Image: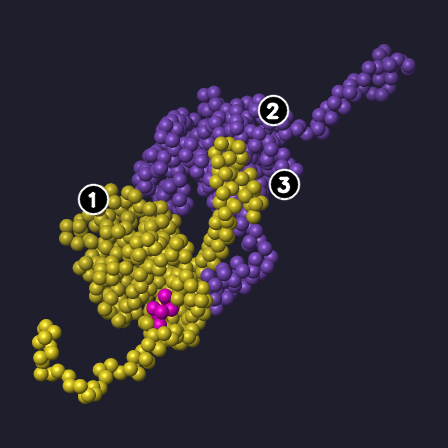
Chain colours: A yellow, B purple
Amino acid sequence: MTKKSAQNKALQELAGVAHSETTNKSVIAALKKRRQTKPSTDQLIGSILQGNITALSRAITLIESTNKNHSEQAHDVITGCLPHANKSVRIGITGVPGVGKSTFIESFGKHLSNSGKKIAVLAIDPSSSITKGSILGDKTRMEDLVKDTNVYIRPSPSGESLGGVARKTRETIILCEAAGFDTILIETVGVGQSETAVHSMVDFFLLLKLAGAGDELQGIKRGIIEMADSIAINKADGENIRSAKIAKVEFNRALHLYPKKESEWTPKVLLCSALHNKGIDTIWEMIDKYVSLTQENGYFDHRRHEQNRFWLIETIKDKLHADFFNNDVIKKELKHQIELIETQKTTPFAAADYLLNLK
Amino acid sequence: MTKKSAQNKALQELAGVAHSETTNKSVIAALKKRRQTKPSTDQLIGSILQGNITALSRAITLIESTNKNHSEQAHDVITGCLPHANKSVRIGITGVPGVGKSTFIESFGKHLSNSGKKIAVLAIDPSSSITKGSILGDKTRMEDLVKDTNVYIRPSPSGESLGGVARKTRETIILCEAAGFDTILIETVGVGQSETAVHSMVDFFLLLKLAGAGDELQGIKRGIIEMADSIAINKADGENIRSAKIAKVEFNRALHLYPKKESEWTPKVLLCSALHNKGIDTIWEMIDKYVSLTQENGYFDHRRHEQNRFWLIETIKDKLHADFFNNDVIKKELKHQIELIETQKTTPFAAADYLLNLK
């Protein structure tokens, strides 16, 4: 419609006639006020405990913030939520890119949701500070799950160090549990030590693998198989079924090489096809059995206590190391001492003594 | 002879005739002086470089001493020896008790000695502070080797911590190399992390195993197989040969599970019978090949540099941890914070922050 035609319209407004406002100013003001007013710590805790997702997301954002005031509020919210946390099953899921982690989580999450579970999907991806959250960042990969009101998805926090990312994720677990999520899925890709970090914050560790052609056991990262409570061979469908079954035998043999686990659980190798929702129920049944076994024999609680102690000690050590090695004098002298060691003018021990005396 | 008959002897001494002393007082004085005078640092270094075993042992005793003056002299001796060290092949040997380590080292050591090598046999046994040096302590287990002038055997230093024992052993290696020993064997049993410590100070890591009945891959300690450059199945003689061959296949399969080593070396499984000196020469030939390969591709030197950096950083970290966790206030508060964590009143991270602020 051109300007001219508009001016010639029958509905042209006559001067002097008052219209009622199409937008209510008092509503706008109230909305603006609500947007600006940050909820108090107690309000946040109260809302989280009622399962309010907005409050949960807001609190997680506080955890992820580098602002000191935010950190302090986050600390108080976490402390308030703590007595209501811990009542969940925490499951770690790992596997190389291409193994179908997103599809698996989509299928597995829907199965759990249909069984009446409330699922939080988190991720640990220390590379996300660069790639801006590659894992779970693209939620379109989990279309159905995103729409499910029983499911809460949160991409990996960013952070300079794995330690920082891991801390934020562990604190996020507490909030999700307090908000009523009873099943926590934590996804990771094999970046650096991220699997170890995830393993040390979950009850059950699931390794997703593919049946490849022939030599599929090659190139398994240090210790990953040893950490796994189960290996699920994904994409076991169509022409892949035969090779998946062969892989199952090989992985069973590989698992057999390790000493019996403290949990008294014998790791299982299962086949599944996340794309076709096949074998997903069996995987959940297995995890359920694991939880029953370890809750009965006391390992479940024992492990969570161990994990708490681990994170306490690790956090302290990380800080001690950072304080020392990030010191400018030490940085410069460390380089020099390494040169002296390499030219056989000092030993690593004498160099260590020298550096320790500088601080 | 009775007193009486002695008095009636023809050779009875006449009064007033002077005898020459049967012991020369000046010689005794000189000997006493020599025993009391500690050699100077320069004298020690000079003697060690000439291959003097007494000087070497004396310097190692200085390293092992907890006396501050001794430590300072040890430091100076090591620094003086350093430019002459590093020219050796360092071989780590591990295996559970009963696998025949002493017999293996006896046989292997003799083979090397016969080939013109000079061998130092050291040990890392962090438990030796309690058991007073169980490994190598009983040198009678290596009867022939002890008598061999090409071989120097030194039991594990004692020490409260593995770190302390490892440091002393690494410093001892330097002195042995400076004294002309070109092959250093370092024995350990699987006590705690001692294998990892030995692995991080040797060029080649040999794992001794036995062929058992059936399930011999069970119960392999975390990471030991992954560290091994070779597995030698000992006692492969008589009726054991069949099961040893089966074990060889299984261990080969187990080694196959790991990613290719940075050294580009493919770990080998060999059979031997140390008691019957069988297969020992083949093991040395293999190590020789490994050394050639890694010296050519640069890994040999690269690894030693990496090891130096590892020990530098580890020593610093150990000291930082000890300073913090041995502090009396921290000790008491750590216990309290762990209680708060377990009763869900704080998180590991908040507790860590709290403790770090105390110091």
Q: Dot 2 corresponds to which residue?
A: B47
Residue located at (41% from left, 42% from top):
B224
Image x and y of residue B121, in percent: 51, 31
For the residue labelled by badge 1, is the local secondary structure a helix, a strand or a loop? loop
Q: Dot 3 corresponds to which residue?
A: B66
Q: How many marks?
A: 3
For the residue labelled by badge 2, is the local secondary structure a helix, a strand or a loop? helix
Residue located at (45% from left, 38% from top):
B307
Measure how far apart labels 3 and 1 are at the Cα level: 59 Å
Measure how far apart labels 2 and 1 are at the Cα level: 62 Å
The kind of residue tagged 2 is Ser
Q: Is the magenta stretch mostly helix, strand or loop?
A: helix
Which one is nearer the viewer's eye here, B325 or B181?
A: B325
Residue located at (22% from left, 48% from top):
A211
**Part of the protein shown in magenta:** A55-61
**10 Å crowding of disc 3: few (<14), some (14-19), many (20+):** few
